[in-house]
Image: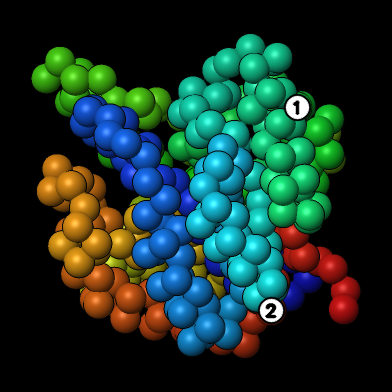
Amino acid sequence: MVSQPTFCVSIDLDDLRYYRAIHALPPVEDTPIIFEKALPRFFDLCNKVGLKATFFTISMDLQWDGAKQALKKAIADGHEIASHSHSHFYNLSQLDRCEIITEVAGSKTELETQLEITVKGFRGPGYNLSPTLLSVLAEAGFTYDASILPSPPYWAARASIIAGMRLLGQRSSSIPGRGRDFFKSRNPSKWPNGLMEYPITACGPAMMPLIGTTITSDSLMRNHIVRCAKRLPFVQVEFHAIDFLDIVHDKLDPALAIEPALKVPLSTRLASFEHVLSTLAHDRQTPVLAEIGVKR
């Protein structure tokens, strides 16, 4: 538990290639567009509302100088850099131990070496965990995980999409999660190995996730989620970099219009994000995830 009402912001820096894989779209040449287009908009949002965020970063993206420079700016501005694995394999939790070590410990080492920081946190690709993955995280020196999304409606929707694609002969790179994780506590907790867990918030009787796509879906949904979240002692909103892209202005592949985050005009999304962050941050401490409970 947290000692006082706490609000945290996190963002997963998933490149567009992962969304193409989710929707069974053919791969294209990778580009650092999220670092060139999305992150400047996210920085502006954080500056407007006076918040610092935790950036869950895929370490292989450090191959791009633009990515490295954007992350160094984030560090200079007081944000936290955490690991989102090295390669963002959606089935990371299902790999053997040696492969998980390479993906997880390797990511931590690469981020720390290239950015000259200490990485404390991890979020699994697709929010997926396993006992082996949790064990490797502790052994690699991570102090917390932030993979739990206790929202049965989210997981049901994902499973139905995956099943529907299979019926059409398409294969998504995404995988269903562990059922036991759907009903985890919404409050910070500690795993048996000492690793802290900071879950993404799910709100109300329906346990709707507090993520970018739900808070921009419609005003009734947004207002309901915010009202419910304000009653919780710990709140974490999660964004994805794609939440800050515009399919027309940024000249994205029209095939990506299937992604829910891109169906709402960018200006509408940004206004909604600013309103929600300002509202939920009111009268709360707002640390980055690694600093929860740290006395200043």
Q: Position of residue 32 (x, y in %)?
A: 42, 51
Marker disc for residue 136: 1
Instruction: Out of 198 and 257, give the one closest to the viewer.
Output: 257
SS label for mark 2:
loop
What's the CA distance linking mark 2 and mark 1? 31 Å
Asked if residue 52 lies left or right of residue 217, the reply is right
Q: In the rendered view, tell whether residue 87 sits above or below residue 224.
A: above
Q: Residue at x 28, y 30 (%)?
A: 27
In the image, what residue type sits under mark 1? Val
Asked if residue 193 lies left or right of residue 155, the reply is right
Q: Residue at x 64, y 45 (%)?
A: 83
Asked if residue 16 lies left or right of residue 12, the reply is left
In the image, what residue type sits under mark 2? Gln
Q: Position of residue 121 (x, y in %)?
A: 70, 48
Can residue 279 be seen at all in this image of the molecule?
yes
Q: Which residue is mark 2?
A: 285
Q: In the rendered view, tell whether residue 47 sits above or below residue 132.
A: below
Asked if residue 267 lies left or right of residue 201, the reply is left
Instruction: Out of 22 and 160, give the one closest to the viewer.
Output: 22
**Disc 2 packing (10 Å; few <14; some 14–19; many ≥20):** some
Q: Quadrant of residue 105?
A: top right
Mark 2 or 1: in front is: 1
Q: Residue at x 50, y 74 (%)?
A: 43
